Image (cartoon, grey):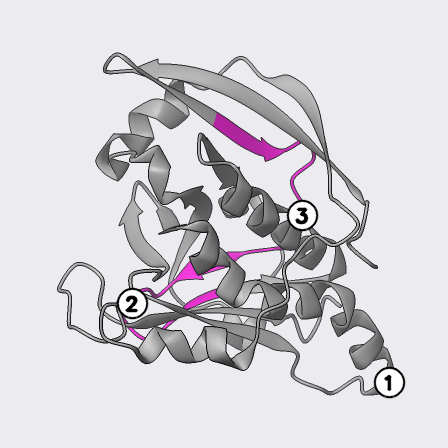
Amino acid sequence: MKLAEQKWRTLVSTVTLGGQSYRVLRPASPKAHAPLYDGAGRGAAQIVVDEAAAFEIACAWWLAARSPNSMIHLPLRQATGECGSWGEGQPSDLVLMHHSVQFPVKQWKELRGRATSWTPHTVRLPVQPFPEVTQSDHDRRWHDGFRDHLLWETAADTLFVIGSRPAFALASEQVRELAEDGPSHIARTPDAHCCAEIDIGRTLRYDRRNPPDRLHITYCETHR
């Protein structure tokens, strides 16, 4: 499915916490199959998807980069799919957010519990949802002074991936390919391993809170 001009139906809730208002978006109909096993800090966090879940993650990725005032919550702990050997680690939710939100993740459990009033909202992706990313753009990641890392934190059974618009953009081609090209690739080669491997954490200087790690999003070998 091409992402261009697709509609993504979501729910929106605004929660005030500590005198600050936070806007939270989540899918209107969470997908049954998209479990996240949080191994961040221990090798990789794994999200195991089918075609519908890959599309939803791509929409969420696009929206997080362009919504500096919103938190995009994917309640993946609700997923029911059994994924055999992939099912290792703590089942978790995923929150994607622009770094401008500046949300203290230790307050997530309280905020999540207060988000009880939801309003339907439809997001329409543009003709070209993701920017073209060149090799020179990727090479910048290894320059001293590079700041556009995708950082990660965990709290209350949730993995947070946080970054600037350029940080999300650097990984956007993988997310797009997984959603748009993955199904046809699997149809041609049913046994193929089809995935996105997204670097998270700081890559140049060691950061105890954000060491280099990986978000591995893969098509399930059973639920395709």
For the residues carrying marks 3 and 2, which lies nearer the camera in this image? 2
Residue 83 seen: no
Q: Which residue is mark 1?
A: 188
Quadrant into which the C terminus falls = bottom right
- The foreground one among 22 and 117 is 22
Q: Residues within 10 Å of mark 2 (few under 14, many from 20)?
A: few
Q: Which residue is mark 2?
A: 146
Q: Is label 3 in a helix, a strand or a loop? A: loop
Confirm or deny contact between disc 2 and disc 1 (CB under 8 A). no
Q: Which residue is mark 3?
A: 32
Please report the residue visible at 45 percent of the width from the left and 19 percent of the height from the top.
115
Quadrant into which the N terminus falls = bottom right
Disc 3 residue type?
Ala
Q: Is residue 27 magenta?
A: yes
For the residues carrying marks 2 and 1, which lies nearer the camera in this image? 2
Q: Is residue 214 magenta?
A: no
Q: Residues within 10 Å of mark 3 (few under 14, many from 20)?
A: some
Q: Is label 1 in a helix, a strand or a loop? A: helix
Disc 1 residue type?
Arg
Residue 48: quadrant of the picture: bottom right
Q: Whole-percent x and y of residue 160?
A: 37, 48
Q: Report the magenta residues as a range.
A: 24-46
Residue 104: quadrant of the picture: top left
